[in-house]
Amino acid sequence: MTAQASELLIYQGQELSLCETPLDDYLASSGRHIEFEATSTALWRGYVGTWEIINARLYLVALDGCMLVDNEPTAVKLKDVFPQYPEGLFAHWYSGELRCPRGKLLNYVHGGFMSTYEEDLFIEVRNGVVTAERVVVNGKGEPDANEGYAEKFICHPGDLIEPIEPEQAERPFYVKDPLGRVPNNPFGHMQQGWVQLLSQLEPSDTLWRFKSPQRGWQDACSGYAVVRQRQVIAEFIYERHPQ
């Protein structure tokens, strides 16, 4: 399994990578039929949730996901999935331990949330209420090791080539199947990943074309990335270049 993009936790004024998926517990136990669509191998769950701890209570405050609507991949937000709670949903269903890795990368594992960082912040939650927290120190990273949760993106800032408008990016990639087996959509069967990328574009963001070289296990690839305040915050890969 490919390393997965993390959730986001806002806690004590900081934005932390969250290597836990509290929403999955709700999806499994609520009785509601909510099914997200995977948008890439780095996001099999099909969504990224933003969580916040307010007065020792855990809330889901934002959601970026993809679902099939009328058989079409469609970007969805928190208000689409939980229309009664557009500003945030108290995670009363969740009991478990939240893990937030911090510091430099010690050991990369190409699967799930299994990589190890210099330290982990663990937050114990019972029925949505924080009951305890602890910090586990795992070791000291090398001086040139990646800082912070590094499994998110293949595209590095130095891989960015040029800014581009979404319509311009789509133009060469419309699929035309004379037999009608593939919808006439940009990127064909990968369209849901493209829709998910565009759903994360905010007015001040920029869409960039990129090409990443081979790095370790990762093949060289081409794609598009959303850049916010000089940081890559989302990516879509349309072509890989095996060596």
Image (tube, rainbow, N blue to C red):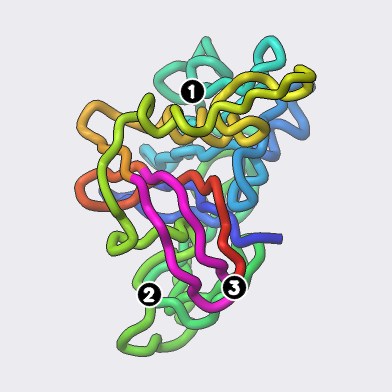
Image point 47% across, 57% down: which residue? 152
Discs 3, 1 touching: Cβ within 8 Å: no
* x, y percent for residue 223: 45, 48
Residue identified by numbered label 3: 243
Q: CA distance from mark 3 to mark 1?
A: 38 Å
Residue identified by numbered label 1: 77
Secondary structure of the residue carrying tag 2 is loop
Image point 65% across, 17% down: which residue? 72
Is residue 213 shown in magenta?
yes
Amino acid at pointer 1: Lys
Decide: few, some or many residues near mark 2? Use Cα within 10 Å; few <14, some 14-19, many ≥20.
some
- Residue 74 vertical placement versus 147 (above, below): above
Q: CA distance from mark 2 to mark 3?
A: 24 Å
Which quadrant: the N terminus?
Answer: bottom right
Image point 34% across, 72% down: which residue? 147
Residue identified by numbered label 2: 146
Q: Let me know if residue 32 appears in the view.
A: no
Q: Which residues are magenta?
A: 209-225
Amino acid at pointer 2: Asn
Which quadrant: the C terminus?
Answer: bottom right
Is residue 164 shown in magenta?
no
Secondary structure of the residue carrying tag 1 is strand
Which of 67 and 124 lies nearest the eye of the viewer? 67
Image point 44% across, 16% down: which residue? 86
Decide: few, some or many residues near mark 3? Use Cα within 10 Å; few <14, some 14-19, many ≥20.
few
